[in-house]
Image (cartoon, coloured by chain):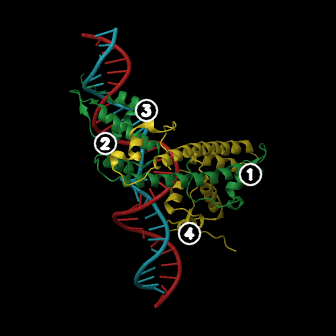
Chain colours: A yellow, B green, C cyan, D red
Amino acid sequence: MRKSTVPIGELARSVGCKVQTIRYYEQIGLLPAPVRTAGGQRRYGAAHREKLSFVRHARELGFPLPAIRELMALTDHEDADCARADAIARRQLEAVNRRITMLNSLRGELERMLRHRPGRRIRDCRVIATLADHGLCSEAHHPEPANA
Amino acid sequence: MRKSTVPIGELARSVGCKVQTIRYYEQIGLLPAPVRTAGGQRRYGAAHREKLSFVRHARELGFPLPAIRELMALTDHEDADCARADAIARRQLEAVNRRITMLNSLRGELERMLRHRPGRRIRDCRVIATLADHGLCSEAHHPEPANA
DNA sequence: CCTAGAACCTACAGTGACTGGAGCTTCAAG
DNA sequence: CTTGAAGCTCCAGTCACTGTAGGTTCTAGG
């Protein structure tokens, strides 16, 4: 049976990401450059599919690209120490925990802010008043912006 | 008593943000341009301090800049409807809730991934194996990267 | 074989919210 | 007056993508 390769669009669809993302990963060296047709189009085999799948899965879990690069380097050495992979995953877990804690705190604050009847004018508005006066917060919250 | 103004560094320290951030907010029109010394240095009064404080507080709560811009426009009209501010805050609360839900799911997955003894070789490594094989996840997780 | 349209290519810049550095000027305390 | 901290504008970087312009290639169907 002939080895089967696919163009970039098919790979992207099968893994669930954008074509541009795959090109980006190749550009930054996270994925190896694939074979090309005589006309210059990329063709990908199973090994590429596995690597890309690994990367996307790790991204979904919030691992930053440098950490993913390191994890992939570990997979290239069968006898490498598993502890390194664990440490990377543990660091990510801690980051997720911190994020959850902070978002819970901010959720509380937003809920309190919204605990009033709408329809009044701005000068009576609790949302605006709270944002204008930090002292109205019932607890300190993290000074880092909380992109949700 | 003379009206007191402060240079940008002092304002930044008092509000707890960077000098560059204040310049950035002025550049994008979120803050009005302040008065200048004859030598071109910015000097800020109490009104600026209040506006910047409002912006930073809203950022800490995760409001995106366009929403903050809108909230500030509301404060310029004393008789504006409070419902608009409420809607903005409610949208932010929903985004925070979604984020928390997703991060909780991802935390579960990372914890399961780490539930084994370290020290083994990569080919036996559960962290690597899970990233390599999506099927090992015990539940579906969101396809959006989970920056924590 | 030919055609046509989908999908491919590179190059370049944008996204959002900052952030930092180069090379210079101003300010204010001593 | 001197000196060093802090100010200025300009430009580009961060992170991880993402989109578009202007062109070429591929492949299915006639």
Picture coordinates of residue A134, whole percent (x, y): 43, 37
Q: Is residue A84 left or right of residue D15?
A: right
Labelled pair 1, 3 in contact (Cβ < 8 Å) = no
Residues under labels 2 and 4: Cα distance? 43 Å
Residue type, label 2: Gln
Q: Which residue is mark 1?
A: B126
Which residue is at the front of the view, A129 or B45? A129
Q: Which residue is mark 4?
A: A10
Which residue is at the front of the view, B2 or A35? B2
Q: Nearer the viewer, mark 2 or mark 1?
A: 2
Residues under labels 2 and 1: Cα distance? 49 Å
Query: Visible in this render: residue B98?
Result: yes
Q: Is residue A101 left or right of residue A111?
A: right
Q: Which residue is mark 3?
A: B16
Q: Nearer the N terminus, badge 3 or badge 2?
A: 3
Labelled pair 2, 4 in contact (Cβ < 8 Å) = no
Q: Nearer the viewer, mark 3 or mark 2?
A: 3
* A138 in relation to C27, above or below: below
Q: Quadrant of residue A93?
A: top right
Residues under labels 4 and 3: Cα distance? 48 Å
Labelled pair 4, 3 in contact (Cβ < 8 Å) = no
Q: Nearer the viewer, mark 4 or mark 3?
A: 3
